[in-house]
Structures are given as structure tokens and as C-alpha cells.
Image (spheres, rainbow, N blue to C red):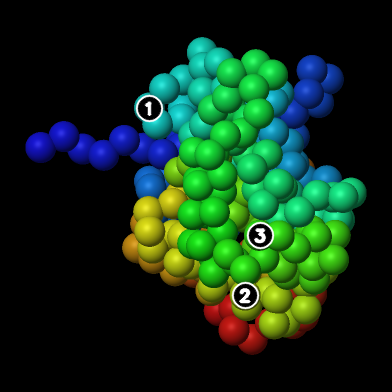
């Protein structure tokens, strides 16, 4: 019996730019249906990590593998078909309906200058249905609430038919109800076999979402120090206090 492909992995990865390395010696592997939370102060390199994992900027050292293929050897359309990015809470697109926003994700599957066809519309509608958003299809994206827009952007990522989602602070600036709505949707996707990597500044999100036996949490400090392991092991009171430069007594009581 063959072992399943690793969804996304990094080996001795260094991230940054030609004149500045932000973090190095990053090694992890995530399978389909598993999750990885990434925490760190502003400027520590979380966004740079995502840009490297997406193949938008080169690794400064080490390597990234996507479904057991070396990322640096893969054409951009192949990467886009397997891994999708969801940005922070998104402002309204001008004059686009929800279904049109979701259909934009079909671009990697289309020939140059081709427009989405009936099959692409079906894929987009299935993505909306996965998140119980079919009634939103004809609504104006700009008129949705922040939580609704974020769910649509997740549906857009699903319409790419990618099996790996990278989400940059998926619930930033959302109220409590919308945060629950987004995380409930992500938990369903994780259960369905989607690999999920997300950044957050709230350790509660990591404890809530990355509590499976194979889930992991990563922290990146301003000095470039990287820690990866189980959420309970990585996010201790002392570790969080050091990571964010606060008194240990300020760390929430749900952290050990």
C-alpha cells in the first residue's frame, strides 16, 4: 500500500530577501486534512513565508515541496492548481457579483484569453454550496458583510480545486460571530481533507483549530527564531511572553 503524498513541506528553508534573511531552518510537513497555525509579531516574516510557499519569491536556502514535487521546478499554473491563497479580510470588488468573484479562481484551468464556461460555473457553484452560500451567487460582493466576504474568498479558493489553502489572518477585523462562521467553515474543509495553513495573532485560534494529533503550530520571532510542534508544546505562557515581548502575567489563562 503506497503512502499518501505530503501536501506541503519545507526542508531547511530560509526565507527573506537578498540582503536580509528573516528566518531559517524551517522544516515541516503537512498532510491533507491537517492544519498548521503560524504566529509571530508584525515584521517577523509570516507574509514572506507565505510568499515563499506560494512560489512568488525564491527560498533563500533549503526547499519547498508541493505534493512531493520541488516547488522551484513547477510552472506557476501547476502551483496555482494545487495551492490557493486567501488574503486578509477583503474590501469589496467593484461591480462584481459573488459568482463572478468565485469564477476568477478558474483562471489556472483556462487557456490564454479564454473565459469561464459552463463547467467553470458549475465548479464555482459547488464551491459556494460547500460553504452554504448558493443564495449569495447573484449578490453584489461589495454589499456583503466582512464575514460573508471572507467566506466568499474561501469559496473562491475552493473553486480553484486546490487541496491546500493558505490563509493570511482569515478572521482579522471580524466580529465574534463572523470569526465563528469562518472557522466553522474551515473546520469542515479540514475534515474533508483540505490542508490548511493560516497566520494569526491570537493563540486561541491555534488552540481551537490545530488540536489534532498531526496538527502543528509554528512561531517566528523578530530575531528569526522558529519553533514548530504541537500547539500545547509551542504555545506556553513563557514562550508567548518571549515571542511578543510581554509580561508572562499578561498571557491568557487558557495557556499553560
Badge 3 is on which residue? 137
Of circles 2 and 3, which is in front? 3
Name the residue at 54% across, 28% down: 109
Q: Is residue 83 left or right of residue 147?
A: left
**Relative to 253, residue 201 above or below:** above
Q: Residue furthest front?
A: 118
Task: Using the rendered image of the protein, determine whether residue 38 is visible from the camera's viewpoint.
Answer: no
Task: Using the rendered image of the protein, determine whether residue 154 is visible from the camera's viewpoint.
Answer: yes
Distance from disc 1 to disc 3, alpha carbons, whole Å, reads 36 Å
Residue 2, which numbered label? none
Residue 68, which numbered label? 1
Is disc 1 in contact with disc 3, using a CB cutoff of under 8 Å?
no
**Relative to 9, residue 242 above or below:** below
Distance from disc 2 to disc 3, alpha carbons, whole Å, reads 18 Å
Question: What element does badge 3 sit on?
Answer: loop
Q: Is residue 208 left or right of residue 103?
A: left
**Which comes sooner in the sequence, label 2 or label 3?**
3
Q: Position of residue 67 (x, y in %)?
A: 40, 31
Of circles 1 and 2, which is in front? 2
Question: What element does badge 1 sit on?
Answer: loop
Q: Position of residue 185 (x, y in %)?
A: 54, 67
Q: Position of residue 80 (x, y in %)?
A: 57, 30
Q: Residues within 10 Å of mark 2 (few under 14, many from 20)?
A: some
Distance from disc 1 to disc 2, alpha carbons, whole Å, reads 33 Å
Q: 3 or 117, which lies in front?
A: 117
Amino acid at each position: 500500500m503506497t503512502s499518501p503524498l505530503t501536501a506541503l513541506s519545507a526542508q531547511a528553508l530560509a526565507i527573506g530577501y537578498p540582503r536580509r534573511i528573516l528566518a531559517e531552518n524551517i522544516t515541516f510537513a503537512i498532510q491533507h486534512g491537517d492544519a498548521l497555525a503560524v504566529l509571530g509579531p508584525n515584521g517577523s516574516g509570516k507574509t514572506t513565508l507565505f510568499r515563499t510557499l506560494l512560489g512568488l519569491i525564491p527560498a533563500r536556502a533549503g526547499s519547498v515541496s508541493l505534493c512531493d514535487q520541488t516547488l522551484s521546478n513547477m510552472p506557476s499554473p501547476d502551483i496555482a492548481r494545487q495551492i490557493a491563497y486567501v488574503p486578509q479580510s477583503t474590501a469589496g470588488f467593484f461591480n462584481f457579483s459573488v459568482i463572478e468573484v468565485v469564477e476568477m479562481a478558474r483562471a489556472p484551468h483556462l487557456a490564454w484569453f479564454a473565459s469561464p464556461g459552463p463547467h467553470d460555473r458549475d465548479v464555482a457553484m459547488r464551491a459556494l454550496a460547500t460553504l452554504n452560500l448558493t443564495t449569495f451567487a447573484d449578490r453584489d460582493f461589495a454589499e456583503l458583510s466582512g464575514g460573508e466576504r471572507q467566506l466568499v474568498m474561501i469559496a473562491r479558493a475552493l473553486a480553484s480545486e486546490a487541496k491546500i489553502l493558505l490563509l493570511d489572518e482569515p478572521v482579522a477585523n471580524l466580529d465574534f460571530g463572523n470569526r465563528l462562521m469562518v472557522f466553522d467553515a474551515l473546520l469542515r474543509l479540514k475534515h474533508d481533507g483540505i490542508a490548511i495553513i493560516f497566520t494569526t495573532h491570537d493563540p486561541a485560534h491555534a488552540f481551537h483549530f490545530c488540536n489534532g494529533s498531526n496538527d502543528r503550530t509554528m512561531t517566528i520571532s523578530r530575531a528569526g527564531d522558529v519553533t514548530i510542534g504541537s500547539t500545547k508544546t509551542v504555545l506556553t505562557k513563557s514562550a508567548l511572553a518571549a515571542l511578543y515581548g510581554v509580561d508572562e502575567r499578561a498571557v491568557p489563562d487558557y495557556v499553560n
